Every structure is written in C-alpha cells, then in structure tokens.
Amino acid sequence: MKLLALAAVLTAAIFVSGCVEISDRKMIEQCRRNHCTLNVMLALETDENAKLKSIRVTRSSGIASADRRVVEMAKRFFPQKIPKPRKNFTYIMPGQVRP
C-alpha cells in the first residue's frame, strides 16, 4: 500500500513540477501531440541500516532526462512515504512523466 502511495505522490510531483528537459525533441513532440505518458520503472535499494542505498532505472522511458527526473523525485519522496523502510530490501516502483 505504501509503495502505491509513493508512486502516486511521485507521479503527481512530476506533473506539478513542469516539463522535463528533453534531448530528443522529435520524440517528445510526437508524445505531446498524442498525449502519451512516459513510463519508467525503478528499483530502490536499502542498506543494512534501512537507508536508501541506490536507485536504478530498470525500465527506461527512452529519454534520459525524463528518467533522471523520476530518479530525483524518488530520492525526494522515499523518506516521506516509506518512513520505516525494510533493511536490505529492494522496492520496485513505477514512475510516469508527461511531457
């Protein structure tokens, strides 16, 4: 349940924060015209002290700057949405960006 809440807040935060810098302008313009959403899947790993150790993109949106934006938001919201993370655990989290 907390993982779903984290995904919802992450998605909302990305939408509110504005557009992402995009290097591949053709792809982004096509996505805007078709009202699509870029999907990213992340793996958030905790260490033996239950602190966030690393974040990996396990499925990219295809646009590096969009992936970076989702990773930044995950770092920001992880401590708030999962206040008592499990030790040595990997959380799998989806993220979305609308250009």
Image (cartoon, rainbow, N blue to C red):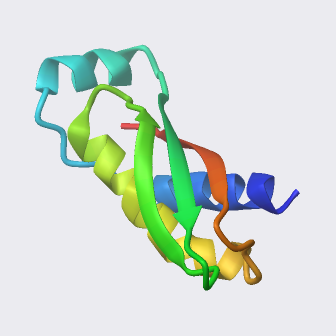
Q: Residue at image x 61%, y 85%?
A: 49
Q: How many marks?
A: 0
Kindly indicate the quadrant of the structure image that contains residue 17.
bottom left
Image height check: is 24 above or below 65? above
Q: Is residue 91 visible?
A: yes
Q: Is residue 17 visible?
A: no
Q: Nearer the viewer, residue 78 or 48?
A: 48
Q: Residue at image x 41%, y 42%?
A: 57
**Horizontal placement of 33 versus 82: left or right?**
left
Image height check: is 10 above or below 75? above
- Extreme residue in the right direction: 1
**Horizontal placement of 82 versus 22: left or right?**
right
Image height check: is 56 above or below 24? below
Kindly indicate the quadrant of the structure image that contains residue 88.
bottom right
Q: Residue at image x 66%, y 54%?
A: 91
How far from the left and from the top, in percent, is residue 61?
38, 29
**Horizontal placement of 65 versus 11: left or right?**
left
Quadrant the C terminus occupies: top left
How far from the left and from the top, in percent, is residue 34?
42, 14
Quadrant the N terminus occupies: bottom right
Q: Residue at image x 52%, y 74%?
A: 52
Kindly indicate the quadrant of the structure image that contains residue 5.
bottom right
Q: Nearer the viewer, residue 93 or 13?
A: 93
How far from the left and from the top, in percent, is residue 37?
49, 28
